[in-house]
Image (cartoon, rainbow, N blue to C red):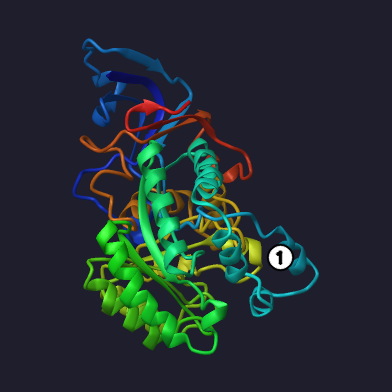
Amino acid sequence: MDILFTNIKELLQTRSASEVKVKGKSMGELPHIKNAFLRIRGENILDFGLMTDLILHQTDAVVDVTGKIILPSWCDSHSHVVYAGDRSQEFVDRLNGLSYQEIAANGGGILNSAETLQNTSETALYAQSVQRVKELIKLGTGALEIKSGYGLSTESELKMLRVIKTIGEKLPLKVKATFLGAHAIPKKYKTDKTVYIDLIINTMLPEIHHQKLADFIDVFCEKGYFSLEDTEQILEAATRYGLVPKIHVNQFNAFGGVGLGVRYKALTVDHLEVLNDDDLDVLKNSDTMPVALPGCSFFLGIPYTPGRKLIDAGLPLAIASDMNPGSAPSGNMNFIVSLACIKMKMTPEEAINAATLNGAYAMDISEHYGSICKGKKANLIITKNMSSYRQIPYLYGNTPIYKVMLHGKFVD
């Protein structure tokens, strides 16, 4: 089907196919066309430009979007949206003075979610999770990375990954799957972590590879979870199965996880609330994308990733929701863009770049997603009437969405 959008107030993120990410000062540049048209054919972007240059051809539908802005749909490169139940009681515990780490030490946190998920059927897990993803689509997310990691057993990790695969098959957004079996140490292995790492390497990874259930491997490289040595052992094994690393590092401590990720050619290093000069130096000489998760900082009251420092050092940056039941229970990328501006001192241009093109790079899909480019997938946000795209982060808490299009079709 051919669809022609006319009288677009601003068409954002108009780029060439060769631009797969932006970094440093370039993050402050957001190419756009005012008073534009955009032509869609099937799933893809066919053409775009100034209304004054539009040559009318026969088309199936013409959509006049006077006063509205069109931009690529959000590319959320870090989420844990597949989970069972919730952890609202832990939210209350934190309000009463317990820290995230104290809750985890008392058997809460990830282990709490794992126990709930292990006792939830695959059908029920899918039903809960798919509803969350549908809500994210309405909020403009058109590409989503989803991690396992709340299973912490072979059976339950595979269950999670099958649910992630089914979501990708049944819903119109682009889904990438990450195996995060190394998210925490299960209770039964608390006194001998090496046995659980052996289970990940010699049982889970071969079966995941056999069933083709994951694109990436992740490890929570943090004190009290998985050490540098543990992480290296798991990454080394995963690369033999073709899984690309995307690792949790520097959420609470900086002790070399960024350098380890770069050494194993990690696509991303995520969190980075704690960052030192050595981390910056090693990232400068790599193709690894730093990913900030401001929703987690907001919810836990911990420091924000120093986005300004990363960008001013000439580095790229992506932002993602980290949606999960314990530390970031919102996947609203509109709010994440606002937080990046308000709390991380990023400009609207930088934040939108971080949530679209760089987010796509952080999922290895920027060849087809993340910008307005001829031949790319027609994954679009059509905003409500706005005076400028700067209102997207400025009007925090409000939904700027008028309509969402994924792969050339409007989402109902």
Image coordinates for residue 293, horizontal then vertical, percent: 51, 62
Q: Which residue is drawn at 28% across and 25% down?
A: 40
Image coordinates for residue 15, horizontal then vertical, percent: 26, 42
Q: Residue at x 21, y 15 (%)?
A: 55
Q: Please name whichever residue, 146 or 196, is drawn nearer the observer in this view of the structure.
A: 196
Image coordinates for residue 108, horizontal then vertical, percent: 66, 71
Q: Name the residue under label 1.
A: 90
Q: Is residue 406 above or below residue 234?
A: above
Task: Kindly give the residue lying farthest to the right in the view shown.
Answer: 96
Graded by Cα atoms within 10 Å as few (under 14), some (14 to 19) or many (20 or more), the crowding at tag 1 reads: many
Task: Kindly give the residue lying farthest to the top in the view shown.
Answer: 58
**Circle 1 — which element?**
helix
Quarter of image, res 280:
bottom left
The answer to whether residue 53 is left or right of residue 159 is left
Q: Residue at x 51, y 35 (%)?
A: 138
Q: Is residue 54 above or below residue 362?
A: above
Q: Please name whichever residue, 408 or 202, is drawn nearer the observer in this view of the structure.
A: 202
Image coordinates for residue 337, horizontal then vertical, percent: 51, 50
